[in-house]
Image (cartoon, helix red, strand yellow):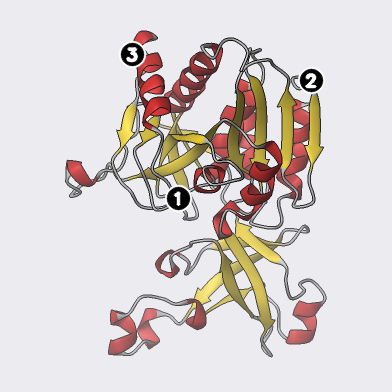
């Protein structure tokens, strides 16, 4: 399964090579041209005579980078992207291309003083343990600057639910790959960007290159349909369809494009929801302000427990995201 392959691949910010290889192989028969720019973004072109549309999904996931090796063989590390330090203790990770297994360790609760028990874990008081006895032994397997990712494997559970690391944004990559299998009249650029989780860096380069009329970010987004959270604070909810954003910290989404997406959803009986939260941001915030600007929108798949070692999504939400965007693109007719 494509999504399983994408999620199980390791590709934190600036280390997206494994994911890039999978995507290039998957899309090669459905596009007219594939280019990889100097940043490492994939820019795939399906030529058309209509509006120039840029569909965006990012290849990178949140992860870690090794910053020091301690004398006892454990390692200091920093985050690549927004990973709350509260969730990192006792997680298993893979380090580097050789997937060296490690455990994120912290002082056990029995040895913590009262103040330590009150406070959240921090990166400073955690380490990565690979079962090494010394600095010299660790250096045989790990180097400064190596990346680490959570070891979570893709799995299905319940009725139509999936759990995996990196659903943000491998789910968007999977949706975009499916969309490329259809033919459209618009001049379509499918862009798989790098380094979104560390400041949308790849999108600055690709958006400047493409210069689209319309830019749509396809994301895995925050979901909070959990006990004790009021309905108005549930940014999105699983099983209620793709989420169409209003605004976030980086963008105010174009009303015309947003209304067109909602109209398409209603006409084709595709369930959808509005993303209630304005937290976060994505590559659309860069696309909107590149060169002469672009009309932008964001269509997202709700994902519980995002930016952690495991997220949860619903397969029907993913299928409906594909259906909504496919119908929207098919409706873009005529010459620019």
Residue 289 shown left or right of residue 70 in the figure: left
Work out whether mark 2 precedes mark 3 in sequence or the reverse, and give the earlier one. Answer: 2
Choose mark 2 or mark 3, whichever is in front: 3
**Residue ID for mark 1:** 281
Seen at 59% across and 60% down, the residue is 63
- Characterize the local packing of mark 2: few (<14), some (14-19) or many (20 or more) Cα atoms within 10 angstroms: few
Eyeballing the image, is 173 above or below 241? below
Indicate the secondary structure of the residue bearing disc 3.
helix
Between the C-alphas of marks 3 and 1, the distance is 26 Å
Seen at 65% across and 69% down, the residue is 65
Assign the N terminus to one quadrant of the image.
top right
Assign the C terminus to one quadrant of the image.
top right
Indicate the secondary structure of the residue bearing disc 2.
loop
Indicate the secondary structure of the residue bearing disc 1.
loop
**Residue ID for mark 3:** 266
Choose mark 2 or mark 1, whichever is in front: 1
Work out whether mark 3 precedes mark 1 in sequence or the reverse, and give the earlier one. Answer: 3
**Residue ID for mark 2:** 29
Please state which of residues 113 and 39 is positioned toward the viewer in this rendering: 39
């Amino acid at each position: 399964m494509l999504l399983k392959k994408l999620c199980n691949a390791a590709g934190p910010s600036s280390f997206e090579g494994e994911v890039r290889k999978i995507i290039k192989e998957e899309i090669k028969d459905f596009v007219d041209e594939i280019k990889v720019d100097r940043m490492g973004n994939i820019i795939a072109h399906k030529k058309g005579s209509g509006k120039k549309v840029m569909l965006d999904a990012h290849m990178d996931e949140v992860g870690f980078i090794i910053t020091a090796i301690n004398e006892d063989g454990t390692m200091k590390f920093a985050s690549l992207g927004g990973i709350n330090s509260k969730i990192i203790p006792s997680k298993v990770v893979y380090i580097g291309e050789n997937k060296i297994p490690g455990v994120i360790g912290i002082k056990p609760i029995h040895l913590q003083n009262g103040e330590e028990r009150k406070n959240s874990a921090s990166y400073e008081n955690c380490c990565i343990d690979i079962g090494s006895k010394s600095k010299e032994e660790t250096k045989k397997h790990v180097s400064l600057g190596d990346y680490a990712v959570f070891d979570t494997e893709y799995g299905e559970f319940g009725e139509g639910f999936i759990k995996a690391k990196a659903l943000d944004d491998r789910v968007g990559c999977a949706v975009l790959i499916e969309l490329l299998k259809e033919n459209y009249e618009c001049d379509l650029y499918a862009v798989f960007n790098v380094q979104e989780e560390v400041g949308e860096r790849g999108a600055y380069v690709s958006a400047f290159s493409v210069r689209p009329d319309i830019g749509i970010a396809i994301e895995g987004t925050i979901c909070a349909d959990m006990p004790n959270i009021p309905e108005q604070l549930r940014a999105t909810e699983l099983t209620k369809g793709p989420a169409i954003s209003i605004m976030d910290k980086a963008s105010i989404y174009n009303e015309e494009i947003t209304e067109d997406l909602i109209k398409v959803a209603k006409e084709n009986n595709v369930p959808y929801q509005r993303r209630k939260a304005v937290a976060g941001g994505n590559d659309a915030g860069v696309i909107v302000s590149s060169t002469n600007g672009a009309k932008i929108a964001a269509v997202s798949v709700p994902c519980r427990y995002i930016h952690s070692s495991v997220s949860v999504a619903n397969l029907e939400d993913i299928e409906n995201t594909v259906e909504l965007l496919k119908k929207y693109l098919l409706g873009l007719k005529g010459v620019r």
